[in-house]
Amino acid sequence: MIGNNRAQARRVAVVGATGAIGTQLVELIFERELNFGALELFASSTDDAPSVEGAGSVYRVQRLENLQVLAEFELIFLAVPTKVASEIAAACASSILIDLSGACQDRPGAAFVAPGFTARQRLLELRASGRTFLTPHPVALAAAASLHGLGVERGLVSAVAMLGASSLGRQSAHQSISQSAAVLNAELDLADHETQLAFNLLLSPQSSRLTGAVRRQVTELVGQAPELAMQFVQVPVPHGAALSLCVPHRFCAVDWRERLRSAPGVLLQEDEPAELIDAVNQDAVIVSVAEEKSARLIWCVFDNLRLAALCALWTAENVLVADQAAI
């Protein structure tokens, strides 16, 4: 454990620090200099990353064997599968939880929050009445930002979300890369239970669950939202995500272009549509609009891991500021 003497003594834990989102979250904690008193990192396995460098120091990643050790932390990031997140939430009732898994959505007092949608004052009010904050799925955040920017509040909008392998976790991203190399060398040999991610396109095995979750989260973020008819597709890239929306002209605000230009977290690209690689390591959802006879076709590319981690970190920054102001 390494302390940060710039802050009040707030103990912060990241659970899932070696996973796909957890790794990005830890990087951003150091990059944006989160104001903590002490930081500890936990993972279910420490084989791949026994330590992490940040702010000129080395942080040891600890194997999480006993959930009770987390109860002493004031703030905990949950970047783990839903089952583990639920168990941690039950064991840490007095801690502030920032849940990136969606496991705590039915917990009393839990609230979805996101920059650009949740006013800081509203977040402070939520902090006064609850201890659990939920971050939206990156696709929900991209959809909400785009639809809100267009002024779309009703009607039927069709959407296809395209997710890279990292959406399934760090291991899947590595698997995608290794499979690609094997295919190019004519050496790919899959076991019966394995799915080919390289040079393949398939409906996400979680498509139905994700569609329901994204619909709810978009409504939670923007209030009044159109009906979304969605599909989730796994695409043969290790990292990043894209969202394609088809919005009938009559549902868009007259000043939609100006609204998109000023929408928080949105970068409107008005010349050539952005490529997926353009969004990697970028904070914004990059949006392009093509006009057809009866509809506008919206193309969004974004760094799904960074977007999720930024949302969680923004929440932590504001919660810690509120707590320090109350001391």
Image: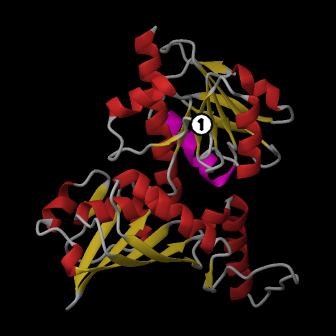
Of 91 and 180, the residue lying toward us? 91
Placement of 286 over or under 126, stated as above or below: below
Residue 104 sits in which quadrant? top right
Badge 1 density bin: few <14, some 14–19, many ≥20, Cα 10 Å: few
Q: Is residue 28 magenta?
A: yes
Q: Quadrant of the N terminus?
A: top right
Give the residue type at disc 1.
Pro
Residue 47 in sight in this render: yes
For mark 1, give the secondary structure: loop
| Image: magenta residue range | 19-30
Placement of 63 over or under 171, stated as above or below: above
Q: Is residue 14 magenta?
A: no
Measured from the top left, where is residue 142 in percent x and y?
A: 40, 61
In the rendered image, the residue lying farthest to the top is 327
Residue drawn where x is 51% and y is 47% of the image: 135
Measured from the top left, where is residue 222 in percent x and y?
A: 34, 54
Compared across the picture, whether 94 is left or right of 304 comes to: right
Placement of 295 over or under 121, stated as above or below: below
Residue beneath disc 1: 108
Residue 283 in sight in this render: no
Of 57 and 150, the residue lying toward us? 150
Of 58 and 241, the residue lying toward us? 241
Residue drawn where x is 37% and y is 44% of the image: 115
Residue drawn where x is 46% and y is 45% of the image: 310
Compared across the picture, whether 302 is left or right of 11 comes to: left
Measured from the top left, where is residue 178 in percent x and y?
A: 72, 73
Q: Main secondary structure of the magenta part?
A: helix
Residue drawn where x is 61% and y is 64% of the image: 167
